[in-house]
């Protein structure tokens, strides 16, 4: 019997192999498995690549956001402005601090926060704003900073934007604090993991303590100290958000490949834009006028007035043909917890609502072949 395996093109796949395995094996054989020298080296390399003074590794971008907000003193009574179209963790981190989430709408073209709408929501209680570099496109933070009251801090949710930039400034160096993700759907991965970046020495010091239970010295400093009987002082209520050296060793290897990965994604993003330009109902993502898109995902917008069928039907058709897709992300105010606890309606943020209903990410990653890309484009054109 002649059988053929069904073709499947994943929405994302990490690129790991022998290099990562050898790096992790070195950590295993060293006996140092928790936060230690490999994490420290990863932090230094990441800070240098993104042109910031401090980088602090943690367990995820979610815990990184929590650390960033907590290090700025965000707490009960404070308000934090968050775009309504983002991954739920952006808003959740505000609630972890006991603060109030204030949603703002997003631009339907860039998918990033609508600056004018965000500014309307600033009050005397606003402690911070969290612009999201969604899908790798940096939000216009310089414009936002010029218009914001000076006391309002900017926390970049740069989960998707490792290696990205706006003008000559890297993601993670545009605001007061930046936060990155190393989840497997991102361009580089440590399995799970995150990184907090800042040029503020005090913020870095507080983050370092908070991620390690509030300890005044790191585990590595304590183990290598001259007086092993002395435990660290704990002056803060902290958390256990430490990255392991196993992850740090993988991160070091992955970081060396970051620019190559982005260059390859950028090449195919440009190819998609050209090849799919004739599909009138499918809007292609934009790029910065100056800077670098990190291309974590290639997120299109299905025009409901022109499309031959609803977006979900298009996604199902592509799935049946072996092409994985996803909605870009979700409108957080439309999710059950936020809808039921705070009484939001879908129409409260129409830009986020429309992006929730009409965006469609198509495959773009470093394991795809030329033939994979051609198959995706041909299939879309055939609808």
Image (tube, rainbow, N blue to C red):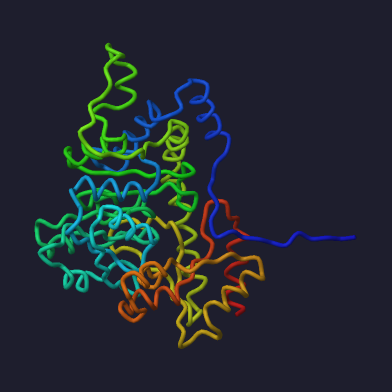
Which image quarter: residue 56?
top left
Q: Residue furthest right?
A: 1
User: Image check: 71 left or right of 306?
Assistant: left
Q: Position of residue 190 (x, y in %)?
A: 46, 41
Quarter of the picture containing the C terminus is bottom right
Q: Residue furthest front?
A: 341
Q: Position of residue 49 (x, y in %)?
A: 32, 41
User: Image check: 60 left or right of 123?
Assistant: right
Q: Position of residue 237 (x, y in %)?
A: 25, 39
The residue closer to the viewer here, 363 or 328, is: 328
Relative to 157, residue 208 above or below: above
Q: Position of residue 255 (x, y in %)?
A: 42, 40
Which residue is located at x 30 percent, y 35 percent?
213
The residue closer to the viewer here, 165 or 221, is: 221
Which image quarter: residue 154?
bottom left
Quarter of the picture containing the N terminus is bottom right
Which image quarter: residue 359?
bottom left
Relative to 184, residue 91 above or below: below
The residue closer to the viewer here, 350 or 284, is: 350
Q: Residue furthest bottom?
A: 305
Relative to 325, residue 211 above or below: above
Relative to 358, residue 252 above or below: above
């Amino acid at each position: 019997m002649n059988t053929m395996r069904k073709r499947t093109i994943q929405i994302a796949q990490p690129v790991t192999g022998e290099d990562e395995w050898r790096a992790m094996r070195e950590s295993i054989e060293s006996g140092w498995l928790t936060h230690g020298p490999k994490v420290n080296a990863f932090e230094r390399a990441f800070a240098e690549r993104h042109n910031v003074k401090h980088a602090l590794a943690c367990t995820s971008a979610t815990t990184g956001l929590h650390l960033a907000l907590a290090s700025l003193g965000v707490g009960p009574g404070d308000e934090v402005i968050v775009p309504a179209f983002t991954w739920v963790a952006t808003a959740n981190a505000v609630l972890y601090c006991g603060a109030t989430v204030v949603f703002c709408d997003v631009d339907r073209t860039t998918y990033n926060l609508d600056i004018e709408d965000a500014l309307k929501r600033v009050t005397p209680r606003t402690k911070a704003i969290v612009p999201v570099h969604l899908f790798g496109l940096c939000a216009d933070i310089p414009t936002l900073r010029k218009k914001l009251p000076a006391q309002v801090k900017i926390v970049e949710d740069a989960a998707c934007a490792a290696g990205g930039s706006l003008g000559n400034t890297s993601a993670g160096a545009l605001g007061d604090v930046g936060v990155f993700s190393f989840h497997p759907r991102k361009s580089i991965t440590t399995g799970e993991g995150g990184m907090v970046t800042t040029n503020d020495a005090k913020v870095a010091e507080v983050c370092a303590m908070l991620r390690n239970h509030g300890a005044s010295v790191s585990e590595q400093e304590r183990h290598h100290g001259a007086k092993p009987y002395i435990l660290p002082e704990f002056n803060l209520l902290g958390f256990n958000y430490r990255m392991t050296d196993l992850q740090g060793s993988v991160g070091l290897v992955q970081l060396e490949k970051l620019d190559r990965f982005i260059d390859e994604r950028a090449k195919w993003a440009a190819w998609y834009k050209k090849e799919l330009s004739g599909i009138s109902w499918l809007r292609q993502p934009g790029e910065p006028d100056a800077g670098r898109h990190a291309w974590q995902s290639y997120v299109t917008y299905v025009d409901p007035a022109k499309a031959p069928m609803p977006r979900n039907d298009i996604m199902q058709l592509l799935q049946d043909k072996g092409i994985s897709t996803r909605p870009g992300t979700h409108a957080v105010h439309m999710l059950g917890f936020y809808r039921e606890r705070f009484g939001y309606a879908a129409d409260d943020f129409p830009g986020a609502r429309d992006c929730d209903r009409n965006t469609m990410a198509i495959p773009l990653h470093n394991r795809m072949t030329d033939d994979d890309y051609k198959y995706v484009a041909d299939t879309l054109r055939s609808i």
